[in-house]
Image: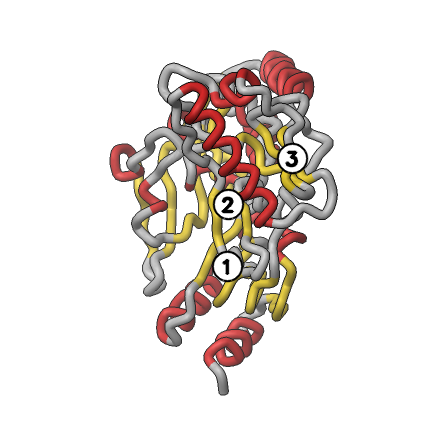
């Protein structure tokens, strides 16, 4: 039996859902990406433990995804196994007077609504960010002056050998669009947020304000991966791109948004190669005209060509 077939059989026996050759374009907000060799939907910590250990024993690479809102997947797809958490990982609850605990697969919208339900403030900035809790913590997502590190108290995770860990404080190594999970190989399973007592109506108004600001300035009606570039020190990437006259510029089906130059949108039928070509064109133009080097915020994964 081939290694992937063996992993698939073991995963299915543990209650996972398995698909071979699943198009990753169905699982990214860019709507771009070729097939994953094996795509597993894992519903419980026990099943995740089995999958990680089995994949390690069979030397099969595993890539975790959340809502796919910060991913650019290669046109030839992803070799090995892609894991999407669901089931028990979608639960959110109050864990103390001022804390909520969310599974990694809970959407940020779900986390925000849970906090609001219990009159807890501190996650309003995340309302409208189209990611999962796990993905947001992985990259320390943020907007409008807020970041995950301001609200996260602790993170439980699972290592490739199946052992459980819990990181808190400096162990999380939060930085600008960075966390310890980018290096330690652990899978985020659930997150505890430490928040402040608030008023539900005031929290709701703040959430609505953040969403309206996004709606006004961002192309929310088009497939994209959000802000393409990290904020260069002393500048705003979108302003630099607009300054260089790049709004509306396109490569194939990928185009710089007319609404917000920091976004690349899929205008229809865009490929990963189109997006990469446009990214490189933007980087080259901005570097030549302003001297500023733009670094990508979105993650490139899989085989490009």
Q: Are marks 3 and 1 in contact (CB under 8 Å)?
A: no
Q: Which residue is more in the foreground, 258 or 14?
A: 258
* 224 vs 82: above or below: above
Q: Nearer the viewer, mark 3 or mark 2?
A: 3
**Mark count:** 3
Residue density around tag 3, few if under 14, some if 14–19, many if 20 or more, within 10 Å: many
Q: Please, is residue 111 above or below residue 3 in the view?
A: above
Q: Residue at x 37, y 72 (%)?
A: 59
Residue picked out by circle 2:
103
- Reading the image, the residue beneath label 1 is 303
- Residue 280, compared with residue 158, is above or below; it is above
Give percent across and percent down for residue 249.
64, 30
Element on which disc 1 rests: loop
Characterize the local packing of mark 2: few (<14), some (14-19) or many (20 or more) Cα atoms within 10 angstroms.
many
Residue at figure coordinates x 36%, y 53% from the top left: 186
Q: Quadrant of residue 106?
A: top right
Q: Can residue 301 be seen at all in this image of the molecule?
A: yes
Q: Can you give x and y, in whole percent of width and height, for residue 63 in the image?
A: 46, 57
Residue 1 percent across, percent down from the top left: 49, 87
For residue 276, above or below residue 149: below
Q: Could you say which disc has been placed on residue 34 in the image?
A: none
Question: Residue tagged by mark 3?
Answer: 250
Q: CA distance from mark 2 to mark 1?
A: 30 Å
- Judged left or right of residue 109, residue 51 is left
The first of marks 3 and 1 along the sequence is 3
The image quadrant that residue 57 belongs to is bottom left
């Amino acid at each position: 039996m081939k290694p992937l077939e063996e992993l698939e059989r073991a995963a299915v026996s543990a209650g996972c859902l398995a698909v071979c050759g699943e198009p990753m374009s169905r699982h990214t907000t860019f709507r771009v990406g070729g097939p994953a060799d094996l795509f597993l939907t894992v519903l419980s910590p026990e099943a995740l433990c089995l999958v990680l250990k089995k994949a390690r024993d069979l030397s099969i690479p595993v890539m975790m995804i959340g809502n796919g809102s910060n991913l650019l997947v290669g046109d030839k797809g992803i070799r090995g196994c892609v894991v999407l958490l669901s089931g028990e990982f979608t639960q959110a609850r109050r864990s103390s007077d001022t804390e909520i605990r969310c599974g990694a697969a809970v959407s940020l919208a779900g986390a925000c609504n849970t906090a609001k339900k219990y009159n807890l403030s501190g996650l309003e900035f995340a309302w409208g960010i189209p990611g999962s809790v796990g993905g947001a913590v992985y990259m320390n997502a943020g907007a409008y002056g807020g970041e995950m590190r301001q609200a996260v108290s602790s993170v439980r995770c699972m290592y490739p050998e199946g052992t459980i860990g819990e990181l808190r404080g400096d162990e999380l190594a939060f930085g600008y669009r960075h966390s310890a999970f980018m290096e330690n190989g652990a899978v985020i399973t659930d997150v505890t947020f430490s928040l402040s007592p608030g008023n539900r109506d005031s929290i709701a108004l703040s959430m609505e304000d953040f969403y309206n600001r996004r709606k006004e300035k961002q192309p929310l009606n088009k497939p994209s991966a959000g802000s393409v570039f990290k904020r260069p020190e002393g500048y705003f990437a979108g302003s630099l791109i607009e300054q260089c006259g790049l709004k509306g510029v396109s490569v194939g089906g990928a185009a710089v948004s007319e609404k917000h130059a920091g976004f690349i949108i899929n205008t229809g039928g865009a490929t990963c190669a189109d997006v990469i070509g446009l990214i490189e064109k933007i980087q080259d133009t901005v570097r030549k005209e302003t001297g500023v080097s733009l670094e990508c915020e979105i993650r490139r994964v899989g085989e490009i060509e």
